[in-house]
Image (cartoon, rainbow, N blue to C red):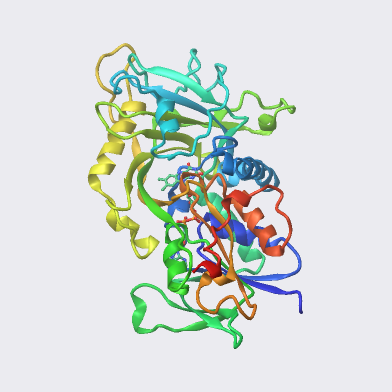
């Protein structure tokens, strides 16, 4: 049929999956294929991230997308029982500053100055004061954090504007829906070349086996009307492989982050949402809540910690802890996401565990002894944030003439980019998916993302 489109999405992280999911809901019929170079999906940031969601912590250029995406997270969770399936909850947020933190630094200072959530926080939301209840101490502090001598606490945001998900489970849900809707998933494959029509336009792309199976390359041609590059930190590599003479560059670097997932006896039961039943509140239907803690460096560790007490599928409590980061110059991006594990630094895991014990280990009341290590590590990870130079994601079409010599003539498939979500790709995923769907369909997105578009090369006349 003349109206049918066929879209190839390069990258099956949360951004590629969200684009595929929302595009598959639209009409006219679109045939969608996701191509990923890894042999297993979700070995990237999307599978190992913290899963913290915010409505309005963003740079003004991305504020509308952030708000939109936060609303979509709640809507999707309500539609498909996200609370049970991917641990969707509203989240209380605290800053915690230990007494040995370097002078004058508080938990939210580093958030604003930006390390882990680099340059991302536009403004902190209004003070949120938590009411005592299950999982909460009499002073309003979360009971899963052990008693901290001379520490200062500050509630910085609440369940109305913040939330959490188990990102791997959310991705698995999106993947399941994509498969149900007939989307093809090709794993262990990478796009190596563009196939052009006689007039110069793009007819499709060639893919071949990725990684070590070079011996049998098994080239395959994928004809398409749209190509979306959504490969996280690998986005520039994919773009440069396909368009070596492009007139633009995509400035997305990688910021590596170690993290751990663990359990503690102090968070054995989910925290009940004491506002449940108050239907005038968005979170009035939620059974449970989660907690996020932000903590500046101390004498014991020199990085800015973040700990998320969240729920896994079937409402099982777990704590994700991270904040220990390295730029790409210190930890280079591997060729395949599945190779990231080999780069894990044991000393980083030790440091994360130490911080986890200090914050949540067993501590006898009124004792001056340090906390005892009674935590159970579930898993250890290293993954890479796609950090754009501009500090905001890059979303939109690459002008044909910017793809390189001769691409501007003859029509053919369009090329799109959706990458560089930095520390906020989980939060912005659903909004990105829907916006990209609209852009590709030629309809106006519900939010203005013009500040995020691919920067065009200089006019040809000036070259
Ligand atoms: C430690 C850490 C904690 C985080 N915590 C949060 C958080 O709490 N909240 C939040 O909102 N965000 C968080 N983030 C950020 C978030 O995880 C990322 O922004 C998001 O996952 C990026 O998704 P993506 O799909 O763009 O990239 P990725 O998840 O990296 O996926 C890219 C995919 O592209 C594939 N690929 C690579 N090369 C090719 C190729 N040549 N061809 C085809 N496919 C290819 C990879 O195999 C991978 O599957 C965190 C990130 C890190 C590292």
User: What residue is shown at x 70% (from left), y 28% (from top)?
Assistant: 281
User: What residue is shown at x 35% (from left), y 33% (from top)?
Assistant: 304
Q: Percent position (x, y) of residue 73?
A: 63, 44
User: Outermost residue toward the front?
Assistant: 462
Q: Percent position (x, y) of residue 443?
A: 74, 59
User: What residue is shown at x 58% (from left), y 55% (from top)?
Assistant: 453
Q: Percent position (x, y) of residue 418?
A: 55, 58
Relative depth, front residue between 138 and 220? 220
Residue 388 visible? The answer is yes
User: Outermost residue toward the bottom?
Assistant: 198
Q: Percent position (x, y) of residue 226?
A: 62, 71
Residue 144 visible? The answer is no
Q: Give left or right: position of 415 versus 44.
A: right
Total number of numbered labels? 0
Q: Give left or right: position of 258 versus 34.
A: left
Position of residue 228 relative to residue 91, above or below, is: below
Relative depth, front residue between 76 and 400? 400
Q: Quadrant of the N terminus?
A: bottom right
Residue 129 appears in which quarter of the rendering? top right
Residue 401 appears in which quarter of the rendering? bottom right
User: What residue is shown at x 36% (from left), y 23% (from top)?
Assistant: 105
């Amino acid at each position: 049929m003349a109206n049918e489109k066929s879209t190839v999405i390069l990258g099956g992280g949360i951004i590629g999956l969200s684009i595929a999911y929302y595009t598959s809901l639209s009409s006219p019929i679109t045939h969608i294929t996701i191509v990923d170079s890894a042999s297993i999906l979700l070995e990237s940031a999307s599978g190992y991230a913290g899963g913290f969601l915010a409505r309005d912590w963003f740079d003004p250029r991305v504020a509308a997308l952030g708000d939109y995406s936060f609303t979509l997270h709640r809507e999707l969770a309500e539609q498909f029982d996200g609370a049970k399936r991917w641990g969707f909850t509203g989240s209380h947020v605290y800053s915690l500053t230990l007494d040995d933190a370097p002078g004058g630094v508080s938990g939210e200072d580093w958030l604003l100055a930006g390390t882990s959530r680099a340059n991302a926080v536009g403004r902190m939301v209004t003070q949120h004061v938590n009411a005592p209840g299950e999982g909460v101490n009499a002073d309003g502090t979360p009971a899963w954090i052990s008693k901290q001598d001379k520490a200062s606490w500050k509630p910085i945001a609440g369940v109305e504007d913040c939330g959490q998900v188990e990102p791997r489970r959310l991705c698995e849900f999106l993947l399941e829906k994509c498969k149900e809707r007939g989307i093809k998933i090709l794993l262990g494959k990478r796009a190596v070349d563009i196939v052009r029509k006689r007039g110069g336009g793009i007819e499709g792309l060639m893919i071949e086996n990725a990684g070590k199976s070079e011996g049998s390359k098994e080239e395959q041609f994928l004809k398409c009307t749209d190509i979306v590059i959504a490969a996280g930190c690998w986005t520039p590599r994919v773009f440069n492989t396909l368009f070596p003479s492009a007139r633009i560059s995509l400035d997305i670097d990688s910021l590596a982050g170690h993290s751990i997932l663990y359990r503690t006896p102090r968070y054995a039961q989910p925290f009940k949402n004491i506002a449940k039943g108050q239907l005038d509140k968005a979170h009035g239907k939620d059974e449970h809540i989660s907690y996020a803690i932000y903590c500046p460096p101390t004498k014991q560790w020199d990085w800015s910690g973040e700990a998320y007490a969240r729920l896994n599928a079937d409402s099982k409590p777990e704590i994700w802890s991270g904040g220990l980061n390295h730029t790409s110059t210190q930890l280079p991006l591997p060729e395949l996401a599945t190779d990231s594990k080999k780069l894990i630094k044991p000393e980083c895991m030790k440091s994360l565990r130490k911080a986890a014990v200090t914050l949540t280990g067993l501590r006898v009341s009124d004792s001056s002894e340090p906390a005892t290590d009674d935590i159970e590590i579930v898993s250890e990870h290293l993954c890479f944030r796609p950090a754009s130079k501009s500090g905001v994601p890059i979303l939109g079409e690459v002008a044909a003439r910017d793809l390189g010599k001769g691409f501007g003539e003859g029509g053919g498939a369009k090329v799109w980019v959706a990458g560089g979500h930095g520390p906020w790709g989980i939060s912005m995923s659903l909004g990105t998916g829907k916006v990209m769907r609209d852009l590709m369909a030629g309809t106006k997105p519900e939010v203005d993302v013009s500040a995020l578009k691919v920067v065009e090369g200089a006019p040809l006349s000036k070259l």
